[in-house]
Image: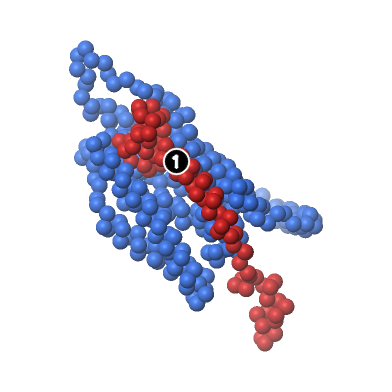
Amino acid sequence: MMRRLLVFGMLAGFFAGLLAFGFASITGEPQVDASIAIEEASAPPPAPGEHAEEEVVSRSTQKGLGLAVATGVYGIAIGGLFAIACAVAYGRIGTGGMRPTAAVVAVTGFVAVAVVPFLKYPANPPAVGNPDTIDRRTGLYVVMVLVAVLAALIAAQVGRLVSARLGTWNAALAAAAVFAVLVTMAAVVMPVINEVPASFPAELLWRFRLASLGTQAVLWATLGLVFGPLAHRVLSPAPAPARQAGTLARADETRASSQATAPSAG
Amino acid sequence: MPDSASSSPAATPLAGGTARPLPLPLPLRDIVPWAVLAGALMLLGIYFVGSEEGAFSLIGGTWMHEFVHDGRHLLGFPCH
Ligand SMILES: [Zn+2]
């Protein structure tokens, strides 16, 4: 059971990673290219007799295979963790099956793993950020992700505790409120990072960050919507074929009614 | 009004809504071994995409960093 859920999570994650790759290529790569152009224009020219900095990986590989492998591996890894989270949440968070459970866990994961860290430490294009502070920035970013995930777990537990008294809907509202308070407190306490050069175009930065957030949104939305039905079939195998007859009859009805209304549209 | 759906015991299961029972949870002891094993592997994958040869370096060099460079930026990780 767990093995199949994990495999389906990784499969859904890989598919989500591929869609995220497509979205990032179209919406994000123009911004990355423009930022690299700014970075190179502001770099000091190589001294005479010295070679310009050699490319370890060509730009076309970075934009193509490199981006695809990065989003693919990231998608598979997030998909695996997502499957485990859904297995734990199933039957424990007030959702009535694996499809709604996967949807709730996907929204929660997107907010905790992507949105909250992004609001505090937003994604930066090349040419933004001092290489000397990468250790500190990486550490703070990871702490922000961990704090948001921990806040989500605490919020879920609070929701479970009050659900018997308040009902599922109000318990979900209480959990959301607990999560919002916890991550807001963390975001206020954590130090500010601002390494955007004054000369960097604000509009380019905005478009890059929007593309970055959109890439994460595509990944998590696909993950939740693809994993849900797959896991649903693992946990409750398809029932009697008798349902098919009903489905067909309903399809006929729909066709008949659409034919009836069709002339009015023309 | 007295014989509305909510007061009829036979109609309650069909009505769904709040009366619908939640599915049986999967036992945690079945999940934990997988969570530990796969969790570690998945986090390693995220580490290679997100931070290898950035703030940390396990295998050294810059090839890995350069290869996943665009993904690292666009997925929101601090890169350089
Ligand atoms: Zn970079």
Q: Is residue A125 visible?
A: no
**Residue at (38% x, 27% y) in the render:** B63
Quick check: A258 left or right of B74? right
All told, the count of numbered labels is: 1
Q: In the image, is residue B11 above or below residue A144?
A: below
Q: In the image, is residue B22 above or below residue A220?
A: below
Tint applied to chain A in the drawing: blue
Disc 1: host chain: B
Amino acid beneath label 1: Leu
**Residue at (30% x, 36% y) in the render:** B80
Residue B37 at x, y percent in the picture:
51, 46
**In red, which chain?**
B
Q: Secondary structure at mark 1?
A: helix
Residue A173 at x, y percent in the picture:
45, 68
Image quadrant where residue B44 sits: top left
Residue A211 at x, y percent in the picture:
40, 42
**Residue at (32% x, 43% y) in the render:** A138
Q: In the image, is residue A92 above or below residue A26?
A: below
Q: Residues within 10 Å of mark 1 (few under 14, many from 20)?
A: some
Residue situated in front as seen by the camera: A106 or A254: A106
Q: In the image, is residue A107 above or below residue B10?
A: above
Which of the colour schemes (rainbow, by chain, secondary structure, one colour) is used?
A: by chain
Q: Is residue A57 visible?
A: yes
Residue situated in front as seen by the camera: A226 or A191: A191
As drawn, the residue found furthest toward the top would be A49
As drawn, the residue found furthest toward the bottom would be B2
Q: Which residue is mark 1?
A: B44
**Residue at (22% x, 39% y) in the render:** A197
